Amino acid sequence: MDFSFTEGQNKFRQEVRDFLEREIKKGYWVPTCDAWVQGFNPDFTKRVAQKGWIGLTWPKKYGGQERSHVDRLILTEEMLRYGAPAACHWISDRQVGGAILSFGSEELKQEFLPRIVRGEIYFGLGMSEPEAGSDLASLQTRAVEDGDYYVINGQKTWTSCASFAHYFDVYARTDPSAPKHRGISEFIVDARSPGVTRIPMVDITGTEAWNDIFFDNVRVHKKYLVGEKNRGFYQVLHQLDYERSGMERLMGNYPLFEALLQFVKENKLSRRPVIRNKLAQLQIEFEVGRLLIYRVALVMDEGRAPNWESAMSKAYCTEFEKRLAAVAMEILGPYGQLTSNSKLAPLRGMALHSYLGSKGYSLQAGTTEILKNILAVRGLGLPAS
Amino acid sequence: MKLTLNEEQEMLRKTARDFLTDKCSKKFVKQMEESDTGYSRELWQEMAELGWMGLVFPEKYGGGNMSFLDLAVLLEEMGRACLPGPFFSTVVLGGLPVLELGSEEQKLAYLPQLVRGEKIFTLAWSEPGYYNYSAAAIAVEAKPENGKYFITGTKLFVPDAHIADYILCVAKTKPRGGFTTFIVAAKTVGINCTVLKTTAGDKLCEVVFDRTPVTKDNILGRLNQRQRSLQRIIERAAVGKCCEMVGNLQKVLEITLEYAKTRKQFDRAIGSFQIIQHCLADMATDVDGARFSTYQAAWMLSQDLPCTKEVAIAKAWASQASQRVITLAHQIHGAIGVTMEHELHYYTRRAKAAELAFGDADFHREIVAREMGL
């Protein structure tokens, strides 16, 4: 056991902090909750790319740095601490790039990875459908072979970052006669292809959080099939393990946590035992979540895909995020209900935003119920229900 | 960063688990709970021969020169086995403060006998009253008189004082904030010890000091220490207790898993029901949280880093998580789990005792609040 970081890692963390503080000082952006998934800032993504911080763990020949997953976690932890607008590259960096690396052809790797690393292209995910949520294997979007092409028809939903995405990572049924887990394939689809339509969806906070994406006879060349035909479901499970692995599940609302602590100190609320107790409990839960997530990065550094480990950390951490928002709302009392554009709204309205937004955290990337199933069956060896 | 044990620690764990599986059956635990002394001299001597008492002490005192982190592994196994007896008292509450505070002369006098398993130690810290685990609450006084000190007052929940050879007694020596740790032979006149009846049968004692005479030689370290410099004793004790709790909870998780996999109702293993699976998933998360936060604090202690906050986080988490885990374990076991016939009650009773030892979650949350600058 060793809970320390190497000197290099400490330096790296400091370097990231210095970079982000400079950015804030220059007024490029303001720390914001959920900025990892809602902060679209192509210039920021470019500057991050220039530092070499996209695709940090990937092979050098595709533009990566071949650094460890703990290093990447340090990077993302700091991005989240400062509420940096990293949404353009977050999903590609976290999971799509890794999926291409794990399953894609050499041609696909050459075509996409260097451009992701340079911050030039962004991806959205085409997984969920209106009738396929937790039961993802029942998805209905079809991809039918037609010469050198697949023709895709169907609807995807809950796609984050879709308005900005250049490409979608789409899962579609290629063999309807096979058992449902064995007839799905993964494709990279150009978002500007004829027949692709995006319809924004506004979430409970009033933010355009997702899009519905419609595919109407969208033609995709066969070379954009990722991995093996009909193995897509196994590939998506692998990718989801990465989707759940990170610090954004714990620190998506970190700017609120920090602002809340500041607020109670400034308003002399921190002497009240009830408030001390609540905030200390949050801190305890936060630190435990952080350790659960570092464990996930260490699993990845051993060369294993995290599975029940990321299910555990994600399920735990999203509950923390809900409690953080709930405590913030309790402490603010009636002021908590004021929206961010109200003149009296404390903490820039972040508490309300988190309170509403956090209801979705335990749904996206696998509901808490699905995650606990994974932990129970895969981690604890219980019989499938 | 590394969150797994090294090879040496894995070996220590295996040795400890094998030994305790062999020597510390639940039947033995029950006998010890019911006995007056609460431990077996024979087993004690075997543990000394395995080098367990000396594990964490430097070689020059006959010890194994290993770290607090290594000791953590051993304590976890002891918690897993519900090992009765004065190991925790002797090593964590007695020996480590001697090592930390004692003069070279004192270390040479006390530690080799401890390491050989010849002498039993304990710490008399807490006192009657509520909510008083910090040194500030200590009211037992040692008053100077003719070149001696006379200790008067009552210490409560002192583990294993009834069999101890030496008691470390923390007493007030200055009206405002001067505390001194005396190492006192338990046979000294004016010490009266009563074993309390507790749920875990773990021999917590009431120790009444009635003008117990001690001399300057009995002072461990310096006279009139500030509260802060004694806090390390309690921090170490809290983390040591967390280690035992991790072992306890890991075992409870395993027992419950096994039960859920084999117990059939409605023609299927109850562990195939999602409601049971989710309870077990929550238990596993609580146990891993306890494990990592505990080992983080243990690692910091063995690196001699300041870790007041991390210790408080570990103990607050383990205290609450243990209650959640135990409650779910009982619910999943059904009625068999609340019988004396089943082994779960050993863990339930010990988890409660551990939660209450060295500060519960409320106590440690307040420390975390202070460390957060609140």
Image (cartoon, rainbow, N blue to C red):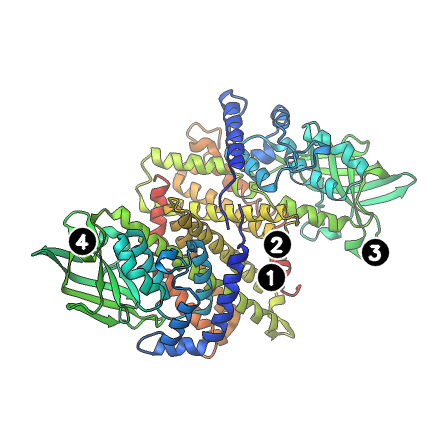
Q: Residue at x 90, y 38 (%)?
A: A148
Give x and y (percent) for residue A92: 68, 36
Q: Which mark is residue A178?
A: 3
Q: Is the residue at mark 1 from the same chain as the one at mark 2? A: yes
Give x and y (percent) for residue B192: 19, 70
Instruction: Find the distance from the CA under tag 3 to the CA under tag 2.
Output: 27 Å
Q: Amino acid at mark 1?
A: Leu
Neighbour tally class for label 3: few under 14, some 14-19, many 20 plus, Cα within 10 Å: few
Mark 1 — residue?
A380
Chain of the residue displaying label 3: A
Instruction: Find the distance from the CA under tag 3 to the CA under tag 4.
Output: 79 Å
Contact (Cβ within 8 Å) of mark 3 with mark 2: no
Task: Give the mark nearer the N terminus: 3 vs 2.
Answer: 3
Contact (Cβ within 8 Å) of mark 4 with mark 1: no
Mark 2 — residue?
A308
Does residue A137 sit above or below A351 in this rendering? below
Q: Residue at x 65, y 38 (%)?
A: A57
Labels 3, 4: front one:
4
Q: Which mark is residue B225?
A: none
Instruction: Find the distance from the CA under tag 3 to the CA under tag 1.
Output: 30 Å
On the picture, is B135 further left or further right than B248?
left
Contact (Cβ within 8 Å) of mark 3 with mark 1: no
Give x and y (percent) for residue A337: 45, 37
